[in-house]
Amino acid sequence: RDPAAAACNAAVERQRNRYLVVDALTRATDAGDCGGMEEARSALMEAMRQVQSSSTAQEAMGQALMEDLEQAMGQLRTSLEYQAGGHAVLRSRRMAHMSQRCYEPDSAASRLYSTPGQASACAAMSAAPAHASSPGLPP
């Protein structure tokens, strides 16, 4: 088997999985907005099955996509939970995977799309005490 072809196929599979997750999050959000919690959960479950059965499922990206799908599923337990903030979580994750950018430091998507410098800055900000003053400002 040609190693270059295998690497290319894996790269294509990763992008295919990302697309599947974006599509599932879009369908779940559309259904959730209309009160269709079962339909929304079904869209996410189908994407979970497809990502899990892919050749790249055990790679970091496959694991991160699964983590985001599982977290999205948790936002769909009830219509009330979805309306109280779950809809924002699903939209945020969808946008992160669609644009391959993320501004949520604790999400799986941030591990996928952050540069090493961004990841380092986020880690430093997370480790800083909440009451630390900014440089040049009195404590």
Image (cartoon, rainbow, N blue to C red):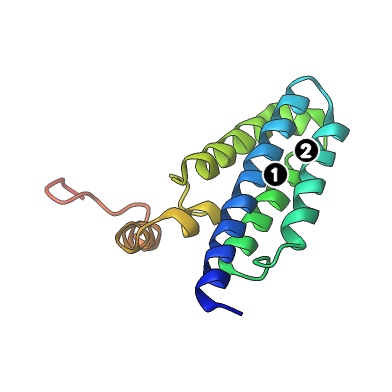
Instruction: Identify which residue, 13 or 86, lies in the foreground.
Output: 13
Secondary structure type for disc 1: helix
Q: Quadrant of residue 129?
A: bottom left
Above/below status of 13 relative to 7: above
Residue 25 is at least partly visible in this image:
yes
Q: Residue at x 56, y 77 (%)?
A: 2
Q: Report which residue position mark 2 lands on.
A: 76
Residue to which mark 1 is pinned: 72
Q: Nearer the viewer, residue 37 or 63?
A: 63
Marks 2,1: beta carbons within 8 A: yes
Q: Is residue 107 visible?
A: no
Q: What is the x, y in percent for residue 102?
A: 45, 46
What residue lies at 53% left-to-right and 37% top-to-bottom?
95
Query: Where residue 111 sits in the image (x, y, percent)?
Result: 48, 59
Q: Position of residue 76 (x, y in %)?
A: 78, 38
Q: Secondary structure at mark 2?
A: loop
Amino acid under label 2?
Answer: Leu
Figure quadrant of residue 87 = top right
Against 75, residue 132 (above or below) is: below
* Label 1: few (<14), some (14–19) or many (≥20) C-alpha neighbours in 10 Å: many
Amino acid on which disc 1 is placed: Ala
